[in-house]
Image (cartoon, rainbow, N blue to C red):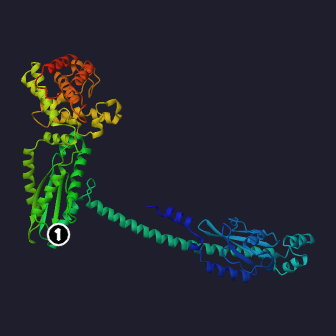
Amino acid sequence: MENYDDFLERKLNDIQFEDAFDLDELQELQDVMSNSLQIASVMVMPDGPFVTKPSNFCSLYRDYVGKTEEEVRQCWHLDKGGSAGQEGYTVSKSFSGLMDAKVSLLVGKRHMASWVFGQVRLEEEQLNQGDIKEKADCFELSEEEFLDAYWQIPAIPRERFENIAKLFFIVSQQVSEQAYQRCVQKIDKEYRELLNEEMEHQKERAEYANSIDELTGLNNRNYFEKQIERLDFLGVTPVAVVVGDVNYLKITNDIFGHRHGDYLLSTIARIMRQESFDDYIICRCGGDEYNVIMPNAKRSDAEWYCNRVRIELAKCFDLCVMPSIAFGVGKKSHKHESIKAALEQADARMYRQKNAMKEAEKMQNNMQNVLLGRGFLTKEYEQTSISMARRFGTYLGMPEVDIKKLTRMVRIQDYGMLPLSKEVFAKRFEMKKMSIEAQREVMKHPILSSKIAQLDIGYATVADLVAQHEEHWDSNGYPNQIGGEDIPLLARLSKIVGDYNLYLSEPPLGLGKNRQEAIQMLKEQAGTVFDPNYTEKFIEFIGQDKGEGQS
């Protein structure tokens, strides 16, 4: 919040005259001083207009000049925006030859108006014939009319007029100080109100921060515990509870990074909120733990809710893994029971389900479903590639152990494409036309595929080979820019088999080429991308192969 000194300065600069001064009081003060001292006075704004009505103007101004404010200003030398001098007042002789003075009305250091007074003759000064004629002509009066009005104006010694000016200055100081204090009091009050509002907002924000999980926007454990106490105290029954534990969070963080792990958590939170009713209390109570309290709900309501969440999560293909969460359900049926006891029941059921899910589903199968759902993989491509790898290995006379490695490589080597957007995935065959950032994302996929391979003991033996399947014969591949026979043989073979089947597959997975076009692409890239010797052997193989499923 703005500090007080800056706030005060800004507000004082914005103050209007009528906010600082009481116009009726100023008019009364001006009238009293003018009548008591037998001088004329008026208050004028910096931009020209009168603040008060003129007091005790002499007949020369009242009868012959003062038809408009502008006429009075011109004859009385009322400058626009002028303030008093260093002594606090300014004394001058007006156009008519009469003595005038002015003091400033201030708020703080800001000039708000001028208090102009005078219209008196000095006893020490006399008009000569030339002055009389000049002034009479200027007022468009005869000399007799001018002198008749002039001699009605009171004459006072210069010293007395100086003392009157000092008196006006002292009074103007007092009036200005009163106005300043009045403004400061108003500003103080406004600042305190704003300060109180800000403190309330800070309190609300602190309470909100203490009850909300920043990542997901759900309530946190602190809020969850308070709601348990509240519902138990009120004796609400029945109460159904759900305990959920997110699957694959650690693996997602380890392989793809915490950004994708956070997206997994927020996606599950969004679906859980989406499928809930307004009175459900959904909280993130730990890193991968989500709990739900359902007041006045039965166990069947909780089970229905869990099933709805699972169904919606199964439709989410924009993550690196299929979002999955193990649920357990519990229920408080009677007032003497506690919600915490119901949560313990739900927690035990959740762990049983989590263990069952681990047995039923491997991580690679989960990722395969995501790839299939996003169009990054087809079962036909996978089956054809695996089958072709086995037949090609047999054709080359490779040992069975190497053939198995080759089939596993062609199956999993592109699973690292999971973090790519659909747009980037579709353009990956034209890397040079992609942005540098998009190229970097594509070039990460061999390493990610290698990490995914390490999750399964059956694939761990090919993890290092998978990391090298995008290396090119001419050393212009990635991630390590090795070339020639420095690239492991199985990595060179998996590159040939995989790319050939991608050429044949329909977009966005592949290029949609026919058999002859795909062979021609292999020939054109032999010696640059592909091992020229094994490319020739592969072309011979597919010319003789009877098991090729694509044409």
Q: Is residue 388 above or below residue 269?
A: above
Residue type, mark 1 in image: Leu
Where residue 348 appears, x then y in whole percent?
Answer: 7, 56
Residue under the point 90% across and 78% down: 144
Where residue 276 appears, x then y in whole percent?
Answer: 20, 61
Work out which quarter of the rendered image holds the N terminus and state it. Answer: bottom left
Q: Is residue 538 above or below residue 184?
A: above
In-front residue for pair 501/362: 501
Residue beneath disc 1: 231
Is 24 left, or right, of 349 in this rendering? right
Q: Quadrant of residue 155?
A: bottom right
Where residue 500 appears, x then y in whole percent?
Answer: 20, 26
Is 320 left, or right, of 117 in this rendering? left
In-front residue for pair 100/70: 70
Residue under the point 25% across and 35% down: 507
- Disc 1 on helix, strand or loop? helix
Is 2 left, or right, of 324 in this rendering? right
- As drawn, the residue found furthest toward the right would be 129
Question: Label 1: few (<14), some or many (≥20) within 10 Å?
Answer: some
Res 409 seen here? no
Residue under the point 8% across and 60% down: 345
Q: Quadrant of residue 106?
A: bottom right
Res 68 seen here? yes
Work out which quarter of the rendered image holds the C terminus and state it. Answer: top left
Where residue 290 appears, x then y in whole percent?
Answer: 18, 56
